[in-house]
Amino acid sequence: MKINMDLNQSISINTNECDWEASPQHGVLRKRLERAQEEEGHATSLVQYKPGASFNYHAHPNGEEILVLDGTFSDNSGHYKKGSYIRNPPGSEHAPYSKKGCILFVKLNQFSPQDNSRICIDTEKTPWLAGQGNLQVMPLHAFENEHVALVKWPANEHFQPHTHFGGEEIYVISGEFIDEHGRYPAGTWLRNPHMSQHNPFTEQETVILVKVGHLLT
Ligand SMILES: [Fe+2]
Ligand SMILES: [Fe+2]
């Protein structure tokens, strides 16, 4: 079953309004945001590991990108607490688990085949850089057209109207992101297509995970 795979469509989902669904793995729940096939291929989800849950040893043919939103996620390579940004490149394998439980934002099988870097960044210990206006930016990854960053907006910041070449995908980590199309509280996932436009602003301090340039169709 395909979910939200028309990349020319604008989508926003407040994940707080979605129920956790069981996955094939006991103790692992998910909220499916986009999915190309039933249990493989391109998928973007929130994933919850209940305390003690584990996942079978598995491979990621086209990579796996994770932001740990809460708790601590573990696998055979280490322990990754809240704020960890992880990229497991195409061909990587692991057997993940969580001793005390965790919640993850996961993008599966969406890497460019040449994007082979294994990346692990503790965003809670990485300095913010000055961005446009009063924004602060934490670059996380760039490959070909794709750029991934955390962006911190102060309260009452207005950004200029802009066009997304290659589209824009956002997960609102804290605060509330706003544009002329709607209001997106913490926990909202947004995907706006190639050449979409908006004029975003905030009323309170807001932190978003942003990926741009990856939605060229
Ligand atoms: Fe995995
Ligand atoms: Fe934008």
Image: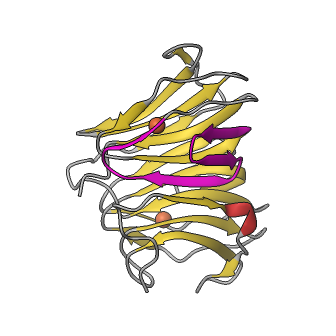
Q: Which residues are magenta?
A: 175-198
Q: In which quadrant is the C terminus drawn? A: bottom left
The residue positioned 46% from the left and 59% from the top of the image is 107
Q: In the rendered view, does 100 fall on the left or right side of 116?
A: right
Residue 215: horizontal and vertical position, in percent? 31, 52
The reply to whether residue 79 is visible in this rendering is no
Q: What colour scheme does the image use?
A: secondary structure
Residue in front for this viewpoint, 109 or 216: 216
Quadrant of the image occupied by residue 128: top right
Q: In which quadrant is the N terminus drawn? A: bottom left
Residue in front for this viewpoint, 186 or 68: 186
**Magenta region's main secondary structure?**
strand
The residue positioned 64% from the left and 39% from the top of the image is 177
Residue 138: horizontal and vertical position, in percent? 52, 26
Q: Does residue 28 belong to the magenta stretch?
A: no
Q: In the rendered view, does 11 fall on the left or right side of 7?
A: right
Count of numbered labels shown in the rendering:
0
Residue 211: horizontal and vertical position, in percent? 43, 43
Quadrant of the image occupied by residue 21: bottom right
Q: In the rendered view, does 152 fall on the left or right side of 58?
A: right
Residue in front for this viewpoint, 167 or 64: 167
